[in-house]
Image (tube, rainbow, N blue to C red):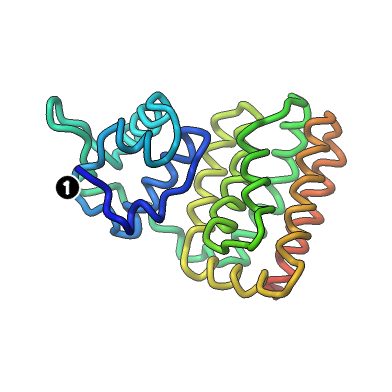
Amino acid sequence: MALSEEQTSRFRPLQRYEQVAERLAADIRSGALAPGERLPSERELARTLEVSRASVREAIGALQLQGVVETRAGAGTFVAARPPVSEPPHDASPSAVLEARAQLEPAVARLAAARAQRDPAAENLMAAMEAEPVDITVWNTSDRLFHRQLAAMTGNPVLLAFADHVASLMDQPLWQRLRDDSIAEAGRTRLHVAEHRMIYEAIVAGDGEAAAFYCTQHINRVRAYMELS
């Protein structure tokens, strides 16, 4: 099954299987890949996304575990006829999301700093956000995945599951609209990325207190830019 020109334009080079899984899941949530539709082959996805077939295979395996896709022997991989429903709680407003992030992310950064290891995926996501001119869609996706990747850097799968849920809430239309408005002013995306780098470098340096402090400062700035009380 060949990808359409529109699908091809949506896909950009990715580095990790988590990002491949997120991209496919986003297409399924948006309806671009409909229930029962067959996914492109591993080979075609790997070529289009410029990743290894192993990364595609791992991504599909992760989506299978979540019940998002199903593989049929000899036929390929298909979007589940009834993908699992993961509606956000009714009170998951952007303000509630930021309140939860303010509690979770500094602790995540502190724990990640205890590992004090560089992470190529986080570095690639920061690089994507630094690209000029800014592509808002890419910027927003990279921003969400960067914060999720901080949880991945802890090595704790429970924290990663929490971060996955928060990332899904940050993919909701209201959040995206407020975020787009909040970074429309010149220089704001660069400031956010600079804060991301401060968080990341503090983690790599093993300075948990600095990492947690920079996380708190960053979330406070996001809240202020989004004009949320």
Q: Is residue 179 left or right of residue 227?
A: left
Task: Please report the residue visible at 29 percent of the width from the left and 59 percent of the height from the top.
Answer: 31
Q: Quadrant of residue 198?
A: top right
Q: Is residue 72 left or right of residue 182?
A: left
Q: Is residue 88 depicted above or below 117 in this figure? A: below
Q: Is residue 224 depicted above or below 166 in this figure? A: below
Q: Is residue 14 left or right of residue 67?
A: right
Task: Please report the residue visible at 77 percent of the width from the left and 36 percent of the height from the top.
Answer: 110
Comparing 124 with 104, the one in front is: 124
The three-letter amino acid code for the residue at tag 1 is Gly
Q: Is residue 79 depicted above or below 9 in this figure? A: above
Which structural element holds mark 1? loop
- Residue 206 x/y as whole percent: 83, 29
Q: In the orientation shown, which residue stands out farthest toward the left?
A: 74
- Residue 5 x/y as whole percent: 31, 56
Q: Which residue is mark 1?
A: 36
